[in-house]
Amino acid sequence: MKQDELIQKIKQLAKERDALLIAHNYQRDEVQEIADITGDSLALSIEAAKTDKQVIVFCGVHFMAESAAILAPEKTVLLPRTDAGCPMADMVTAEGLRELKQQHPDATVVTYVNSSAAVKAESDICCTSSNAISVARSLDAKKLLLVPDRNLGRYIAKHVPEKECICWEGYCPTHDRLQPEAILKTRAEHPDALFMAHPECTPEILELADHICSTSGMYEYAAKSPAQKFIVGTENGILWRLRKENPDKEFIMPSNCLICPNMKLTGLKDILSCLENMEPRVTVDEETRVRAKTSLDRMLAVPRD
Ligand code: 13P
Ligand code: SF4
């Protein structure tokens, strides 16, 4: 089937199924192009919960679709590829977290949304890359367990020196690969460029950044900044919208390692197939869902900076 035909079929079927197509900022260009909404992981889950549509086709990775299913249990949440997981989310289990909690019974658990529903259910509050510092500052606790991303954890710890922070040793294989040498080399080649970095990058990379933010934060920063050139410290799927929204600006990838294989799994054929079959569906058992939702709701109640 030709791409145009595929796109027409998806649009027609999405209408018949009353489905909303949402895509994370790292998805393939053609997937972002066909989506009703693109955004960061949190924004997409909130949109999924808000929409009147009954079916959500979540083009992203498993934990994102799961967050949508936690927030909107009455909706049918479809993940076009069941094998689209997040290796960082898989680096912590509910059992492992329970063990750490036993060692630190006085600590508050702050869990990045890149985690399973079972881990969220064991946590006190969630955070995302866009609100992690506000969430940490909002807590009375003196001691925090920051799960599962050690890089986001260290970034939070640096900004809340008044709290003792214990970081889980998880990481994003895509962001963790980025080396400071690649940034220094790209900076030398483009001395007029600003470097924006995702907090999943290592502390050495974040030290070099002009701006640290979530994927959606990068769209805002690039649009508002008077600079003409940007070095992009996150997954390369972000380029599609950055370039579309800022046609007069230049966006440079410092390395060709910034590709998340899981984010690139979903193609147009997978979207059509999931709309035809109304599966694979993502669900969360009710007991886990209710506890995980409490952690997400606490986060959503924290005022944004
Ligand atoms: P955002 O929440 O910034 O979209 O990031 C999600 C993610 O998986 C980054 O690797
Ligand atoms: Fe997970 Fe990293 Fe891929 Fe994001 S980029 S989904 S954190 S592996």
Image: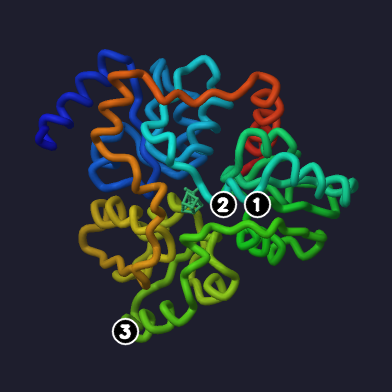
174 to the left or right of 204 = left
> On residue 117, which mark appears?
none
Q: Quadrant of the N terminus?
A: top left
- Camera-near label (3 vs 2) is 2
Q: Which residue is mark 2?
A: 88
Contact check, label 2 and label 1, Cβ < 8 Å:
yes
88 to the left or right of 278 = right
**Residue drawn at x 89%, y 46% as measured from the top left:** 105
Tell me the amino acid under the disc marked 1. Answer: Pro
Mark 2 C-beta closer than 8 Å to ligand 2: yes
Q: Position of residue 166 (x, y in %)?
A: 77, 59
Give the CA separation, mark 2 to mark 1. 7 Å
70 to the left or right of 269 = right
Give the CA separation, mark 3 to mark 1. 35 Å
Is disc 3 placed on a helix, strand or loop?
helix
Tell me if mark 1 has few (under 14), some (14-19) or many (20+) residues whose alpha carbon lies within 10 angstroms of its own: many
Give the CA separation, mark 3 to mark 2. 32 Å
Mark 1 C-beta closer than 8 Å to ligand 2: no
Which corner quadrant of the image does residue 304 belong to? top right
Tell me the amino acid under the disc marked 3. Answer: Glu
Q: Position of residue 144 (x, y in %)?
A: 79, 53
Q: Which residue is mark 1?
A: 148
The front one of 124 and 217 is 124
- Camera-near label (3 vs 1) is 1
**Residue drawn at x 63%, y 45% as measured from the top left:** 127
Tell me the amino acid under the disc marked 2. Answer: Met
Residue 162 lies, with reference to residue 4, above or below; the image says below
Residue 71 lies, with reference to residue 253, above or below; the image says above
> On residue 189, which mark appears?
3
